[in-house]
Image (spheres, rainbow, N blue to C red):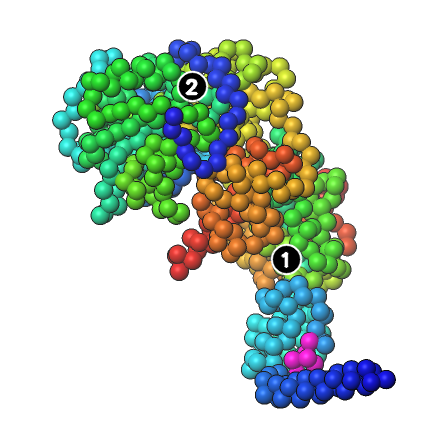
Amino acid sequence: MKTFRIGGVHPAENKFSAGKKIQQAEIPKMVAIPLAHYIGNPSEAIVKKGDMVKVGQMIGQANGFVSANVHASVSGKINKIDVQLDASGYKRPAVFIDVEGDDWIETIDKSNVIKRECNLSKEEIIKKIKDAGIVGLGGATFPAHVKLSLPPGKKAEVLIINAVECEPYLTCDHQLMLEHGEEILVGVSILMKALEVEKAIIGIENNKPDAISHLKKLATTFKGITIEPLKVQYPQGGEKQLIDAVVRRQVPSGRIPVEVGAVVFNVGTTFAVYEAVQKNKPMFERVMTVTGKDAPNPSNYRVRLGTYLAHVVEQAGGVPEGTGKIIGGGPMMGRSLMNLNIPMAKGSAGILYMRDEETIRKPVQNCIRCSKCVSVCPMGLEPYLLMAQSERNMWPEMEVDRVMDCIECGSCSYTCPSNRPLLDYIRYGKATVGGIIRNRNAK
Amino acid sequence: MNLVLISLITLGVIGSVAAVILFVVAKKFHVFENPRIDEVEQVLPAANCGGCGFPGCRNFAEACVKADEFGDLFCPVGGNETMKNVAELLGKVAVTQVPKVAVVRCNGTCEHRPRYNEYDGVKHCFIAHNLYSGETNCSWGCLGFGDCELSCEFDAIKVNPITRIPEVDEDKCTACGACVRACPKLLIELRKKGPKGRRVYVSCRNEDKGHITRKACEVGCIGCAKCQKVCPHDAITITNSLAFIDDEKCKLCRECVIVCPTDAIIDVNFPAPKKKKEEAEAVG
């Protein structure tokens, strides 16, 4: 069975919410839709206080090339446009809407009929995806239309769909594949058309045998789509790791995947593409997992964008006793949340309760040069060295040692027997070196 | 006997050959260095703090000797006196600068700014700053992990363990600027020390709108512009709901301190604190 060739760890899977049907979360009384994205410029609000909006109406316009449109996820009155603490840990602009009813704009096709034919041209598809404000749901929320507009002279050969869901605990993509398998495959063929590729490969880790067999059965009716079962290994969902696992090509340092002829999309994004192109539905809701070892009811919810996490947690039965931290996202790459008064954004894949005793940081000891971090690093870096350089502010040396290649997967910190905060220091170094490089390029 | 003689002669010959080589090489590859660089270096404080913008005192001395006029060259640690000595040595005109001191523009102590969450990661400001906005609701204020304290070569800035806000020891502070560069929240500023150490400054960096600042911190600047209106010297500017006092224009009249509704403007080293207007009226 295939997997990526360098490094990797295998944390306990703990997929408690697997097989739980996706439930529609209740619409809250008020939402705060974030205008900022994880990556790129924040969108510009095009509504003002007091305006009435319908579900699916555009409220934020993309600002710059790497940015995406934002749409209202509820119908009602704009309360205010203000800053709101979000999952990034900072206060950023958001649109607050008081909910009144659930009135969708007319163009959205609300029926459940699966539309397989798509006669649109490449440009029309990309335009529809851009208008719908679709971003990658794998975590980085990179705008999909930017990824589809390949740099001139570059040609994609294969489309890879990331359905590995390598993060422990999370099951939203798994459940989406079981319930909306056919829609996803239609989405894949739309993306294939937009990229003008003949071949698409869906990579799924083999801890989801039901999803593999379900999609394999469906894929026989679609041209050019194959399913590739992969060995369970973290971080297989990383773009470069997945390309290595599926087509055995390594993306050179500092380059983008299309240089080796591959383009990667998350399976959630594919479903959103289907909805946008075939049903005219912009991205205003996503599936998220609420889980944890003590969670009263681990489950998958379809949540409207901008819903406060507290509202979702309440529906899932509240925060269990003895919870030390609540993580937004998976346990490996997620961030611990400051409070639950944070709106859910396009990139929020889950809410995870961690027990008190699991979250305590153990005392940091000296590096014993065991090189475990080196052997698990999926990018082939030397985390112990990068941490030492970061502590001493040795930025030019860090750049030479390719800190910018770090994907922040956290495998090094996970595996360190001395409990050293490797990733914390590397992330700081990466941010600083990135700033230095940007300044240099701007000159 | 023979053995001793042989070894003495051999060593002697090797020694003399080496001496000749060293002499020739020293003459041939001699680098001329202006002797005044050494003299200037003697006068400098030898702190090697980098406050002048050069990596060390010797590099600064070199730059001083090379320069026609001092211009921006200034040793903040030695101050005007050292620069006068350097100027005398080199026969140039001394540049005087007003002595400066580092001020921490945050007064969000535990009392003024409640903490809502607990950070258990690496106790460094730069790492915490990279992760999130901090333990309080103010995303601009001091994180209190003491990167400034670590950066200070003169032991002049210390985080008060009770308030968790750094405090500057004016006598020790040399205004080298190391802490200014260390603070990820850009809270520390070099300001004029002022006559008798008296100065007035806005002890806040919060650029959020007034109501958000007010909820997060009792003593934050809410950008009400009262100080700007009352200032007779046009020293105060307001940008993004944050007041800033220009120390070039400020005449230390302290009108702004009296009108500030949140006590965000701080006056230090003044004899008796002026009473707030309401209090003064109530008394009189």
Locate the C terminus of chain B and report the quarter of the image it occupies: top right
Going by the image, does B272 lie left or right of B211?
A: right
Q: Is residue A209 above or below residue A261?
A: above
Residue A358 vs residue A296, the one in the foreground: A358
> Is residue B37 within the magenta segment?
yes
Q: Which residues are magenta?
A: B35-41
Q: Amino acid at mark 1?
A: Ala
Residue drawn at point x = 58 percent, y = 22 percent: A354
Residue at position x 50%, y 44% in the image: A381
Residue B264 in view here: no
What residue did someone put label 1 on? B178
- Can residue A64 be seen here? yes
Question: Residue A47, how many percent across, how many down?
Answer: 33, 32
Between A394 and A13, the one lying in front of the other is A13
Parent chain of label 1: B
> How far is disc 1 from disc 2 in space, using C-alphas?
53 Å
Residue nearer the viewer, A338 or A117? A117
Please tell me the numbered disc located at residue A207: 2
Left or right: A46 as drawn, with respect to A29: left
Relative to the observer, which residue lies in front, B241 or A302? A302
Q: Amino acid at mark 2?
A: Asn
Placement of the N terminus of chain B among the 4 image quadrants: bottom right
Q: Residue furthest front?
A: B2
| Residue B3, percent from left and from top | 81, 82
Mark 1 or 2, closer to the camera: 2
Residue drawn 49% across the image and 51% down it: A401
Q: Secondary structure at mark 2?
A: loop
Q: Residue A348's spot in the image, x, y percent? A: 44, 27
SS at mark 1? helix
Q: Residues within 10 Å of mark 1 (few under 14, many from 20)?
A: many
Find residue A69 and report its image quarter: top left
Q: Position of residue A429 (x, y in %)?
A: 53, 47
